[in-house]
Amino acid sequence: MLAAEEYESTHAARGIVAAPHHLAATAGQEVLAEGGNAVEAMIAAAAAIAVVYPHMNHVGGDGFWLIREPSGRVRYIEACGFAGSLATIARYHDLGFETIPTRGPNAAVTVPGAVGGWALALDAARSHGGRMTLRRLLEPAIRFAREGVAVTRSQTRLTREKRAELESAPGFAEVFLPGGEVPEEGSLQRQPRLADTLDHLASAGLADFYRGDVAREMAADLERIGSPVTRADLERYTARERPPLEMKIGRARLFNAPPPTQGLASLLILGLFDQLKVARAETFEHIHGLVEATKRAFLVRQQVVCDPEHLPHDPASFLDPKSLAQRAAKIDMKRALPWPHEAKPGDTIWMGAADASGLAVSYIQSIYFEFGSGCVLPSTGVLMQNRGSSFVLDPKSLNPLLPGRRPFHTLNPALAELADGRILAYGTMGGEGQPQTQAAVFTRHALFGVPLGEAIARPRWLLGRTWGDQETNLKLEARFDGNIVDRLLSVGHELVVLPEDYSDTMGHAGGVVIHPSGQLEGAHDPRADGGAAGV
């Protein structure tokens, strides 16, 4: 793996895509090369990565978009599904559950929203001159599903680690345990039923996923396996546009996703850190300041973030300069706040795209845990997410299970307009780690001038639990300076230094930049299997 100082960005003139799998980046790059815009490129990449990175995302999951238009307008597309009409607290209690299971049919609680988001994004692409047909955008994904792709290292590892809890989920073994065995890295993986589904959508249109033949087949399979999601739920679903959350700090205007996502926490971390007036990157003050800002932001998140129709407080009120100053004043730069609290896991992919017209896209797509619910619907090949397992079977809680309610989401794409004229779209996978990695990448690159590729590759930290991990303490990659580690310990941080220089625990981050000169730049994480590709 490359050392941080060797990890450089990709530069381009017409368009660029950053993704955690090279085939997804290439799918977007080819669309750009044929004259497509950044949103069209992202739709192609989103469909492709659902096929080639199925342990992290699939068409049975959700997605969130930030699209910055050349005019400066930032559009937010919320493509997350709601709980099915049979998903009641009484039903789960009658089945003997004290919590919602994380695997199997009773974990497949919510309608998949991602495909509905692709449809709204396609409308947005066409409003900016996009002329690519849906079939052309889905063609790489169809080919990868039908002809097969090489299984990645992370898929092999996670399949092996999670096999015991996944292999009994309906349809999982038939698709992801060929011959009853964990597929080896590099072996060929085909998803023929998914190929047929995508091919049908290319002809019938994306709405067919919810109100057509694909919906009919999905609903029949969901009923057969015992999921609480019905055909009527699919028919009712549409993705929607809403105003993004935004916040102004000294050197940037920041945008992120509103509830039900934790985008509020991501903005709070940066808003609180800005109040601390830290001068240099990779210092004790940098790392400690961001970790303590994270704690304060997560305490707010736990009290606020839920279905947007049921918010107890206005999220924007926490981003007010006065509120930020009051909360930042509670951060002790000489002592760590005792931790932990309830942590949020999650498996996800982030991708970014930009083009010469000034379009920039920050997109995130997920099925929650690795392989989601594990349920693969046999007629369509759709792998269902388990996002609804984040609901609580307590009607008095902040996130109670109710039909039609949207669950808490760790997903949050980020975008920034910098004072020097740069536009930065950035993000990461990694559940609890998403706001923290966003903060690491943004502060290094936007505040302290670290080159984009290096800002992503430099050693990272994680407070709390994320995908593939059960511990809730502070974790640091092995490349951190020992003096900083000692100082963090001396002020009370409970921490562990991981053995890896580049750990998957830290998530897979990426970013794309539109420079004032018009030059495009992109980079993706050396911890992942992808990169950036431009034209």
Image: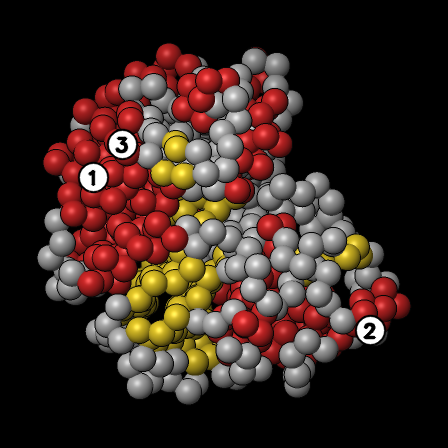
463 to the left or right of 19: right
As displayed, is residue 286 above or below residue 198?
below
Label 3 to label 2: alpha-carbon separation:
52 Å
Q: Mark 1 vs mark 2: give the one in front.
A: 2
The answer to which of marks 3 and 2 sits earlier in the sequence is: 3
* Front in this rendered view, residue 496 or 263: 496
- Tell me which amino acid carries mark 2: Asn
Label 3 to label 1: alpha-carbon separation:
19 Å
As displayed, is residue 404 above or below residue 380?
below
- Residue 88: x, y in percent? 49, 23
Residue where numbered disc 1 is placed: 206
Kind of element beneath mark 3: helix
Query: Which label was assigned to residue 109?
Result: none
- Tell me which amino acid carries mark 3: Arg
Q: Is residue 4 visible?
A: yes
- Residue 259: x, y in percent? 47, 52
Residue where numbered disc 2 is placed: 483
Residue where numbered disc 3 is placed: 146
* Front in this rendered view, residue 343 or 523: 523
Residue located 79% across and 55% down the image? 496
